[in-house]
């Protein structure tokens, strides 16, 4: 799995201070979500690629017109 992230240019070795990956319960939605360095690095990558945007003053993340397809292709989901 790490090789796939490295192929995209996501280097997890440079990050410290939190677990690489962990589950986190999203209380309002009652769903598990990804947390930790892997989640943060993936989010940063999607912002850098222009695949997602965040409305000012919110924690909401929205895919751009091409972003969802590009994300699905890159991460095979």
Image (tube, rainbow, N blue to C red):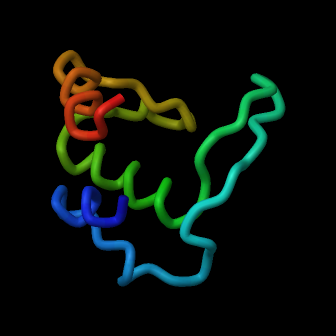
Q: Who is closer to the viewer here, 27 or 74?
A: 74
Which residue shows up at 47% across the image and 60% down it? 38
Q: Is residue 60 above or below residue 12?
A: above
In screen coordinates, is 3 left or right of 29? Answer: left
Which residue shows up at 62% across the image and 75% down it? 18
Q: Residue furthest toward the top?
A: 65
Measured as percent of width and height from the top left, residue 52 is found at: 31, 33
In screen coordinates, is 46 left or right of 49? Answer: right
Q: Who is closer to the viewer here, 65 or 19?
A: 19
Q: Who is closer to the viewer here, 77 or 31?
A: 77
Which residue shows up at 51% across the image and 83% down it? 16
Q: Is residue 12 above or below residue 44?
A: below
Which of the image's four quarters has the N terminus?
bottom left
Which of the image's four quarters has the C terminus?
top left
In screen coordinates, is 13 left or right of 45? Answer: right
The number of numbered badges drawn on the structure is: 0
Measured as percent of width and height from the top left, residue 68 is found at: 28, 23
Measured as percent of width and height from the top left, residue 4 is found at: 26, 57
Q: Is residue 15 above or below residue 44?
A: below
Snapshot quadrant of residue 72: top left
In screen coordinates, is 52 left or right of 20? Answer: left
Q: Is residue 59 above or below residue 45?
A: above
Which residue shows up at 66% across the image and 58% down it? 22
Q: Who is closer to the viewer here, 34 or 51?
A: 34
């Amino acid at each position: 799995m790490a090789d796939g992230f490295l192929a995209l240019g996501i280097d997890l070795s440079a990050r410290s201070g939190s677990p690489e990956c962990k589950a986190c319960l999203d209380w309002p939605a009652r769903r598990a979500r990804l947390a930790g360095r892997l989640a943060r690095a993936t989010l940063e990558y999607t912002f850098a690629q222009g695949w997602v945007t965040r409305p000012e003053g919110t924690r909401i993340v929205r895919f751009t017109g091409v972003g969802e397809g590009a994300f699905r292709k890159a991460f095979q989901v």
